[in-house]
Image (cartoon, grey):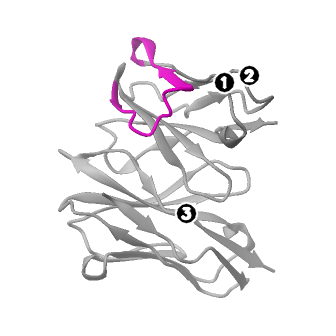
Amino acid sequence: EAGVAQSPRYKIIEKRQSVAFWCNPISGHATLYWYQQILGQGPKLLIQFQNNGVVDDSQLPKDRFSAERLKGVDSTLKIQPAKLEDSAVYLCASSSLRQGYVGYTFGSGTRLTVV
Amino acid sequence: AQKVTQAQTEISVVEKEDVTLDCVYETRDTTYYLFWYKQPPSGELVFLIRRNSFDEQNEISGRYSWNFQKSTSSFNFTITASQVVDSAVYFCAHSRAYGGSQGNLIFGKGTKLSVKP
């Protein structure tokens, strides 16, 4: 079974620029999550999708962050404009109601550096 | 609201020592899940274990063991005879349960374990 794919692996941008991250979940997984992990901290949920609908985006800074999951498969997370404090690893994860004891599967993440 | 506390920020041990990573959680839910994840220097999150709130049996998997105690809201993780490859950041996490599945994960801040040869 292929894992959760994320790209790019690394990204360096200047503040006020825009950036987009892409995630392809495990085939058949209805639930997709984007997490932000700031250095030295645990991951924090930004947004959760169930198929192509948003379940929870209460912690997404909507003035600059946006995310979509068209057709309930791939997802894109965008930041516009970026701030220095957005420097973090952005993790995508997916899960399935049929997954039983396996739990969530995480991608390798995108490391964003804002300079 | 749910909260996960990992009081130990960093632990350093010498190879072959046993080490216990502490995790304390707060929740008002009666049904929930608890997790442990390993994050090696490469950055990916590796799933170690998931525990249902109704199952307080301790679990052992090779050199790893977990002690779940609802009375103290703790879910501690012990590595026996630690090895250098165990060096990583370990996260404890909680999620709510919905009809057999789970909600989103709430993570602790992590414990960085360094195992020296």
Q: Position of residue B45 (x, y in %)?
A: 58, 50
Labels 2 and 1: the sequence-earlier one: 2
> The numbered mark 3 sits on a residue in which chain?
B
Residue labelled with disc 1: A81
Identify the secondary structure beneath mark 3: loop
Is circle 1 on the same chain as circle 3? no
SS for tag 2?
A: loop
Q: Is residue A87 above or below residue A38?
A: above
* Front in this rendered view, residue B24 or A86: A86
Residue B30: percent from the left, percent from the top? 17, 62
Q: Is residue A51 visible?
A: no
**Residue B116 on image: x %, y %:** 79, 79
A52 inside magenta stretch: no
Q: Nearer the viewer, mark 1 or mark 3?
A: 1
Q: Amino acid at mark 1?
A: Pro
Query: Residue B72 bears which disc, if any?
Result: none
Q: Quadrant of the C terminus of chain A?
A: top right
Q: Quick check: B47 left or right of A31?
A: right
Name which residue type carries label 3: Lys
Q: Which residue is mark 3?
A: B109
Near mark 2 (Cα within 10 A), the count class, few <14, some 14-19 or many ≥20, is few
